[in-house]
Amino acid sequence: MRNDSGSRNSDSEERDHLTPAQARRKAQNRAAQRAFRDRKERHVRDLEAKVEHLSTTAATLQSDNERLKLVLQNTQTENRVLRATSGMPSLPSNLHNEHVDRTRIHRSTSDLPFHPHRAPGPTSAARGEQMSQGYFMTAGEAWELLQSHPMYLSGGLDVKEVSKRLKRKARLQGGEPVFLEEDVVGLIEEVGMGSGLA
């Protein structure tokens, strides 16, 4: 109690000795200190609010990122399934040329000297009949051989050029075109090597 009383007495005596100008400056200093403390507290509260907002945003972004990864994974799976069920050969992964003429893979067969999707009718030369000149193939068999050849599967074989050359090699057996197997294979490899696929 003595200390409190002494402190009050000291403050009272100090005020008594201050001039009006000094008292105003002291009051202004105290007001400035209070304003500074208020600004500091406000700034701290603002920072805390921003940190909380950033934390919420980061959590939301992480959740969205995980969701998008799942969507991408599902899309890739669907694409693989579609490619596998489409019946069309896919390009090998070691081909990096983005300008490969994909239309060669999907080229219409109207330019071919045969109709690969039409089953040949009965002919004097049965399917794959072995003759003295070699193994003869029907148009359907020749098309299947072309489709399964690695040069075709690579995506760059010029099917139109193969077709054009095959027309000159076709032989008629019972009204249907047939081809020597060695001619078909030879033309595929010849055109493929000419395209730089070998």
Image: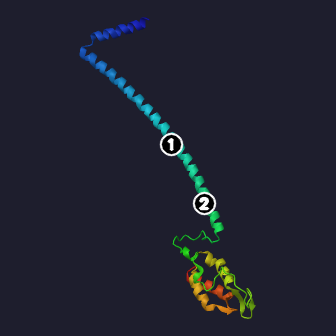
Q: Quadrant of the C terminus?
A: bottom right
**Residue 129: in sight, yes or no?**
yes
Which residue is depicted at the point 38% across and 9% down? 7
Please tell me the numbered disc located at residue 76.
Answer: 2
Which residue is depicted at the point 28% across and 16% down? 23
Q: Is residue 39 left or right of residue 125?
A: left
In the image shown, does 14 or 156 lie closer to the viewer? 156
Q: Total marks drawn? A: 2
Q: Residue 75's x, y, as percent? A: 60, 58
**Structural distance between the alpha carbons of marks 2 and 1:** 28 Å
Q: Quadrant of the N terminus?
A: top left
**Residue 198: in sight, yes or no?**
no
Which residue is depicted at the point 60% across and 84% down? 112
Q: Check disc 1 and give the amino acid type.
A: Thr
In the image shown, does 70 or 58 lie closer to the viewer? 70
Location of residue 90 with respect to 132 vertically, above or below: above
Which tag, 2 or 1, sits closer to the chain's start?
1
In contact (CB < 8 Å): disc 2 and disc 1: no
Q: Residue 136's x, y, as percent? A: 71, 89
Quadrant location of residue 84? bottom right
In the image shown, does 44 or 143 lie closer to the viewer? 143
Please tell me the numbered disc located at residue 57.
Answer: 1
Taking the view exactly as shown, the residue that stands out farthest to the bottom is 132
